[in-house]
Image: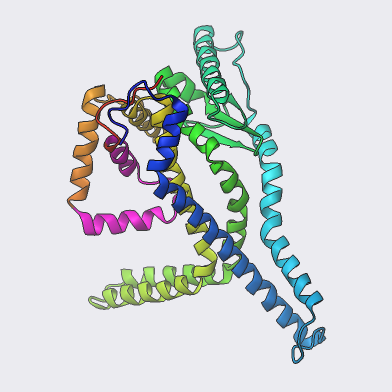
Amino acid sequence: MFTGIRTSLSRVELVELLRSHSLPLVLGKKLAIFLIVLTILIIVTSFVASVIVIVNVPLKIFDFSQMIPLEIIGTLLLIVIMAAVVPGLLTYFSLPRIYDRDLDVRVKLPEGEGEPSINADCNRKLHTLGSDLRLWMRQGLIDKHADVYYTDRIKSNVITYGNLDRARIVFALDVLQEMSLPQLRSILAHETGHIVENDYIVTCMFSEVTKILHYLFWPVQMINRIIKTVFMYLERLPLGILRFVFSGFSFVIRLIINMISMPLWLPRALLYWESQLAEYLADDYGVILSGSASGLITSLMKLEDMRVSLGKSGFPRRYDLFATVVAHSRSLESNTVIGDIVTFLSELEQSHPNSMRRWQRLARLGMQDVRVK
């Protein structure tokens, strides 16, 4: 995709080229956000209308046999909009402060505590990452103020959050200690893509709302869990072929229940879909800003390796990395039908796409590193 691009293009020009080549991802994100808003409004409207109808039966507040006045319609629309938007707005204004407090974010490690050499190395990395971020701001890649912090409250993770005018990229302390500076730059470039595209704002605005809608349907969820538990014990009985019958009944019943409750889990699934598209697009930014597709793959591998607590991995050499990713991808593609179905179903409840798919896509960006000014 970006192979062969030379120093004649600046980073700003490369980002514009990226957005033109990544137009399906951009349009997919916009479509997902539109569907999220639409489904939330439909669900809230239906919920408010149902409550009004139920309450109106004994109290006779409204006479539905006659045309409802425009004032009542306007009031109902205001209630619906407030019920759908207010939780998101409250989360938007409160979440950054809550994260700052809970994560206890800091800009510099204390020199007099712990291992002085390790702390000095981490501070050097933080200073360099902050300088890179400020450089991208001066170049016009980021239209808001962004800062780099660290925290020791989380492990093996990097978090981006904030508001429209200010964003924060927070590295876990163990990430700063274990990862090299080039790897940290690749992760910083990826997180910068989230800032440029305002992905963290979308997640902040809709995450809590979709959770509320999901939990509103708790009776159906409870029935689904009871049915699943009952049939799980029935399937363990020594009843021969009846076990398969029970298993089939359990699957069909739970499928029907999930289809009935679709309007309530659909916004959450759409939010996960938008988040996965955002990860792919942020990977593209990571390649452009860091200047290395192979470096970003290595960094993501290292970060995932730390998350599953496997210790330090013996990664293949830089130029063997693409071949390794492609080889693994081809082996996965040998089971296309079952493997793709299982992957698709598992990703419905995940905010990040399948790691191997991400690495394979990054490998397709070019077998050579992108060269920028």
In the image shown, does 86 or 141 lie closer to the viewer? 141
Name the residue: 45% across, 51% down: 27
User: Is residue 338 within the magenta segment?
Assistant: yes
| Residue 351 can be seen, yes or no | no
Q: Is residue 162 left or right of residue 199?
A: right
**Number of marks drawn:** 0
User: Is residue 36 within the magenta segment?
Assistant: no
Q: Is residue 158 left or right of residue 143?
A: left
Q: Is residue 15 left or right of residue 133?
A: left
The image shows residue 65, relative to residue 159, as above or below, that is below
To which quarter of the image does residue 282 belong?
top left
Q: Is residue 237 left or right of residue 84?
A: left
Whole-percent x and y of residue 258?
A: 46, 70
Whole-percent x and y of residue 22?
A: 40, 43
Name the residue: 62% across, 20% down: 107
Whole-percent x and y of residue 232?
A: 37, 68
To which quarter of the image does residue 68 belong?
bottom right
Name the residue: 27% across, 24% down: 314
| Residue 116 can be seen, yes or no | yes
Q: Which residues are magenta?
A: 335-363
In the image shown, does 143 or 290 lie closer to the viewer? 143
Quarter of the image that includes the N terminus? top left
The image shows residue 241, relative to residue 216, as above or below, that is below
Q: What color scheme is it?
A: rainbow
- For the stretch drawn in magenta, the main secondary structure is helix
Quarter of the image that includes the C terminus? top left
- Residue furthest front in the image: 8
The image shows residue 277, relative to residue 73, as above or below, that is above
Name the residue: 69% across, 50% down: 89
